[in-house]
Amino acid sequence: MADEKEGEVNDDDVAAEWAAMAEEDGEGADGGEGGGSDEDVAAEWAAMADDDGGDDLDDGGGGNARVLNQDEIDSLLGFREGGEETSDKSGIEAIIDSGMVSYERLPMLEVVFDRLVRMLSTSLRNFTSDNVEVSLDNISSIRFGDYLNSIPLPAMLAVFKAEEWDNFGLITVDSSLIYSIVDVLLGGRRGTAAMRIEGRPYTTIERNLVERMIAVVLADLSAAFDPLSSVTFRFDRLETNPRFATIARPANAAVVARLRVDMEDRGGRLELLLPYATLEPVRELLLQMFMGEKFGRDSIWENHLATELWFTDVELEAVLDNTTVSLNDVLRWEVGSRLDLLAKPASLVDLKCGEVKLFKGLMGRKGEKIAVRIEEKMETE
């Protein structure tokens, strides 16, 4: 009780001190109004001091312990009033969000896409007979399901297969590039933007022209991968509905390279998607920082291997003669049966290692052992 009274006295002193300071700062003309406001300020500070004192008493003098209310908890977790989830990725939601998982970087894949950009610029110039510039916007990792949901429609999706890797990839051509390719291939004038007609399906002519462009892109993509690993990309089908172009599970990771194709005032975007499952056969090669980092010619090991080969034991067979016998005769053989060979003392004997004939020689005797003297070396194809 004594401590409580002492706290109240201190609070009153603080309030009186602030009231005196306010009176000294106030002007004489506004004395009446200033006095009222000063009293309000003093009362406010007194109330704050009372609150602080009460908290200290409640906490036992151990500091200001604060409990979050429900609104603050919802704000931290990323919810609006009423329990609705907010659109911003914040708080714990951002931590557990599966879409924000980072994937390993593949340095050699960036080199492959750079080669693709250079080769594609030349190929599309020859294909369209126009001035074409291809640029690489970015390379990113994304969930396959999230990518399908982000495709702006209308668009064409070309599904292709990597023959050697036995898996699929996806090329997305947006509507601007589709109409630009159609316009330039059908003789549209330069310097005029391609006409876009929305709200109708793509015609057979448009699909055929886009397929021809996709064939050019796939040929250059195969050539871009050649220094790393020989692979053939084969066009499979062309779709306009993303759900029919599903080549992987929605949660699977994929690499997306976004290319920009400019033809003077015309152009559009081309997106190349390769699932990580498709790149798995060459994953070790793509992890390299430069070509030949983890493989190549090792002169030390090569010399060691050549030296050790000279000390390798090789088993040779000496074949006196070859003859053909029917199975019926073989079944009638008994102990003591004779097999006649056409070999004579002067006949040459074949020396073989496995199925490969190496030498021809004469059979003889040296001491207690039968020997063959090499007379001729067989030429291998």
Image (cartoon, grey):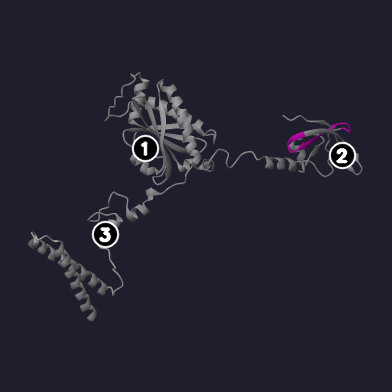
Residue 204: give x, y in percent of width and height.
35, 25
Q: Say which amino acid is labelled 3.
A: Glu
Magenta residues?
344-357
Disc on res. 72: 3
Which residue carries the number 2 mark?
A: 371
- Tell me how many marks there are: 3
Residue 117: name its quadrant: top left
> Quick one: label 1, few (<14), some, or many (20+) residues within 10 Å?
few
Residue 242: give x, y in percent of width and height.
35, 37
Location of the N terminus (image quadrant): bottom left
Q: Say which amino acid is labelled 2.
A: Ala
Q: Nearer the viewer, residue 31 or 170?
A: 31
Is residue 205 in sight in this rendering?
Answer: no
Q: Furthest residue to the right?
A: 367
> Quick one: label 3, few (<14), some, or many (20+) residues within 10 Å?
few
Q: Nearer the viewer, residue 239 or 138?
A: 138
Is residue 10 in sight in this rendering?
Answer: yes
Q: Which comes before the other along the chain, label 2 or label 3? A: 3
Residue 40: name its quadrant: bottom left
Residue 36, above or below 101: below
Disc on res. 244: 1
Disc on res. 361: none
Left or right side of 337 for 86: left
* Alpha carbon separation for disc pair 2 and 3: 98 Å
Residue at 37% from the left image edge and 41% from the top image edge: 147
* Alpha carbon separation for disc pair 1 and 3: 44 Å
Residue 208: give x, y in percent of width and height.
38, 25
